[in-house]
Image: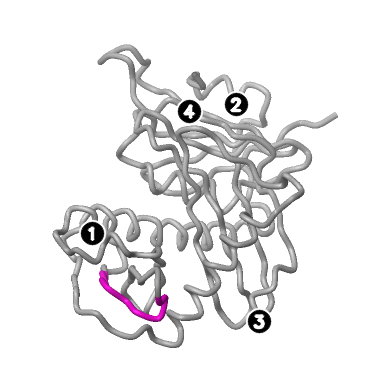
Amino acid sequence: MRYFSILTILFCCRLSAQMEPDGYDRVLQRGELLAKLELASAMSSDFFRSSLDPRKDSVGGHVAYLSGERVTSIYYANSDPSLIYHTYSFDKNVDFGSMRVDTHQRAATAREQELIALRRASLKAIVSDSTNFYSAYKFTVLHHIPLIDSAMRVVYIRTVSTREQFTIFGNDYRLTFDSTNALIKREKLHQTLMPIESSPKSAGSRPDTVVTHHSHSILSSDLPTETDVCTLIVTAGHVPWQQHAVLTPTWNCVWNTPEKNFRFFKKDVK
């Protein structure tokens, strides 16, 4: 169980928070986008699974994307990925009350077809891998999140627990593809899987101020990752802690859930 006082983390840190490290703005923005897409996927999946639509047994998968001020989640046919069965959209805050549902079958737009093809390419990359680069664990699933803009074609892969009492950090990847969806780069964002118990054993069993943590090795990023930010936003409200620390070789990075941001404390590295 990774619970301890926030003072423990700061004991070896300089007492005042430092300015945000270079590159963190991009990490935060990307992580916030991933969180919106994951929240839209989760809410729409719950609704889709509970529907009586007989087509749900022949769905090939789903993708979510940002469209103007709304976040859209679509479910496509397994036999023909260009066919969309269900379309869900949310406001920019991805509130359940803002959800709009369209169950009319339609043709996927050009952008949707690109996202679907990219997601399928990332699935193929894992299935066809013979180097043991990717890991799989019991009681977990891999979430593939494709992103396309003028500068990139990337799929983030998160490991998510199928047991509600655990939140998982690690075993996540960033795959970069070219314009033909050929894989050109693959990266492990963390080197290990780090499950943290998400629910207190009993009321009052935790101190009033607690923080969980996970660590980055020298082979991982010296900053929190986009997937760290995503996980912390997605799980907010479902976990008993208000703070989470990412401990890197250079920084102790403390996430404050109400602020949805990190504070950085530079280590006194001798």
CB atoms at circles 1 and 3 under 8 Å apart?
A: no
Q: Quadrant of residue 153?
A: bottom right
Q: Nearer the viewer, mark 2 or mark 3?
A: 3
Give the amino acid type for the residue marked by disc 2 in the picture.
Leu
Residue pictured at 60% horizontal, 42% vertical: 171
Q: Is residue 79 above or below residue 259?
A: below
Precedes in sequence: disc 3 or disc 4: 3
Give the amino acid type for the residue marked by disc 1 in the picture.
Phe
Q: Quadrant of residue 85?
A: bottom left
Range of magenta residues: 80-89
CB atoms at circles 1 and 4 under 8 Å apart?
A: no
The residue labelled by disc 2 is: 10
SS class, disc 2: helix
The residue labelled by disc 1 is: 48
The residue labelled by disc 4 is: 196
Precedes in sequence: disc 2 or disc 3: 2
Q: Is residue 16 above or below residue 84?
A: above
Residue pictured at 55% horizontal, 43% vertical: 263
Residue 198 on image: x %, y %:
39, 29
Give me the C-alpha separation between circle 2 and circle 3: 45 Å
Is 116 magenta? The answer is: no
Residue placed most toward the observer, 83 or 11: 83
Residue placed most toward the observer, 165 or 11: 165
Q: Nearer the viewer, mark 3 or mark 4?
A: 3
Task: Give the residue furthest to the front.
Answer: 79
The residue labelled by disc 3 is: 179
